[in-house]
Amino acid sequence: MIQSDGQSTTLTESGAIFGGPARISGATAGSVVIKDGGSGGTTLATFATPASATHTAYIDLSNSPIRCSTSAYATITNATSVTAIYA
């Protein structure tokens, strides 16, 4: 279940999801890497994306969110866009 204070952002390239603490609860074959502490931060999770130009993927992390203690960052490889929901 997403918390009532949840927010989202859509990235079309690698970048900051949110500049403070966050929990992430949810793009050709590639990957999305969630890091804590910016582009050089600690890798917390890596998700493979489908090998299709028209396929979308949804990863439900509502029961086990990823906790970023300092800042949430996504490195996106071979994906058109990624929407991250955070609280």
Image (cartoon, rainbow, N blue to C red):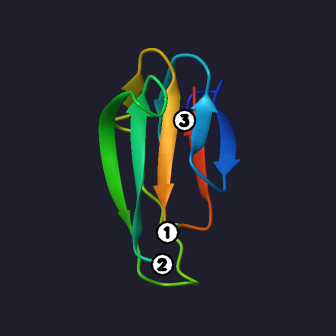
Residues at discs 1 and 3 in contact (Cβ within 8 Å): no
Q: Amino acid at mark 3?
A: Ile
Which of pointers 1 and 3 lies earlier in the amino acid sequence? Answer: 3
Up-down: is 3 above or below 76?
A: above
CA–CA distance in space, label 2 to label 3: 28 Å
Q: Is residue 46 left or right of residue 1?
A: left
Which of pointers 2 and 3 lies earlier in the amino acid sequence? Answer: 3
CA–CA distance in space, label 1 to label 3: 27 Å
Q: Nearer the viewer, mark 2 or mark 3?
A: 2
Q: Nearer the viewer, mark 1 or mark 3?
A: 1
Q: Amino acid at mark 2?
A: Thr
Residues at discs 2 and 3 in contact (Cβ within 8 Å): no
Residue at 31% across / 35% down in the picture?
Answer: 44
| Res 9 visible | yes
Residue at 39% across / 47% down in the picture?
Answer: 33
Residue at 53% across / 80% down in the picture?
Answer: 55
Q: Which residue is mark 3?
A: 2
Up-down: is 87 above or below 30?
A: above
Badge 1: residue crowd in 10 Å (few <14, some 14–19, many ≥20): some
Q: Which mark is residue 28?
A: 2
Q: Which x, y percent locates residue 17?
A: 60, 35
Q: Amino acid at mark 1?
A: Asn
Which of pointers 1 and 2 lies earlier in the amino acid sequence? Answer: 2
Q: Which residue is mark 1?
A: 78
Badge 2: residue crowd in 10 Å (few <14, some 14–19, many ≥20): some
CA–CA distance in space, label 1 to label 2: 6 Å
Task: Provide the secondary structure element on which disc 3 rests.
Answer: loop
Up-down: is 69 above or below 82?
A: above
Up-down: is 31 above or below 40?
A: below
Task: Provide the secondary structure element on which disc 2 rests.
Answer: loop
Residues at discs 1 and 2 in contact (Cβ within 8 Å): yes
